Image: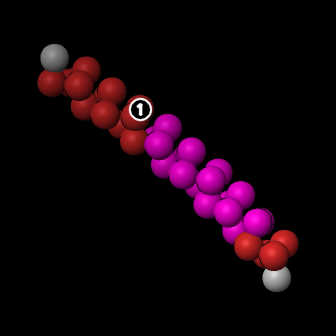
Amino acid sequence: ASQDISSLKNIAGETGKKLTSLASSFLTDIQDRIL
């Protein structure tokens, strides 16, 4: 069970990184259009 939890944490971490990079590039795109 502990292995499942650790793997879930790894998946959540990878997903978080992807979401963060997506959000930052999205915000940069919006700022470029506004400016």
Residue 1, quarter of picture:
bottom right
Q: Is residue 15 magenta?
A: yes
Name the residue that disc number 1 marks.
25
Residue at (32% x, 28% y) in the render: 29
- Identify the element where label 1 is drawn: helix
Front position in the image: 26 or 12: 12
Residue 33: x %, y % from top left: 21, 24
Front position in the image: 11 or 33: 11
**Residue lying furthest front in this view?**
2
Q: Is residue 17 magenta?
A: yes
| Part of the protein shown in magenta | 6-22
Q: How is the image coloured?
A: secondary structure
The 10 Å Cα crowd at callout 1, few under 14, some 14 to 19, many 20 or more, is few
Residue 34: x %, y % from top left: 15, 24
Residue 3: x %, y % from top left: 84, 72
Q: Is residue 13 above or below residue 17?
A: below
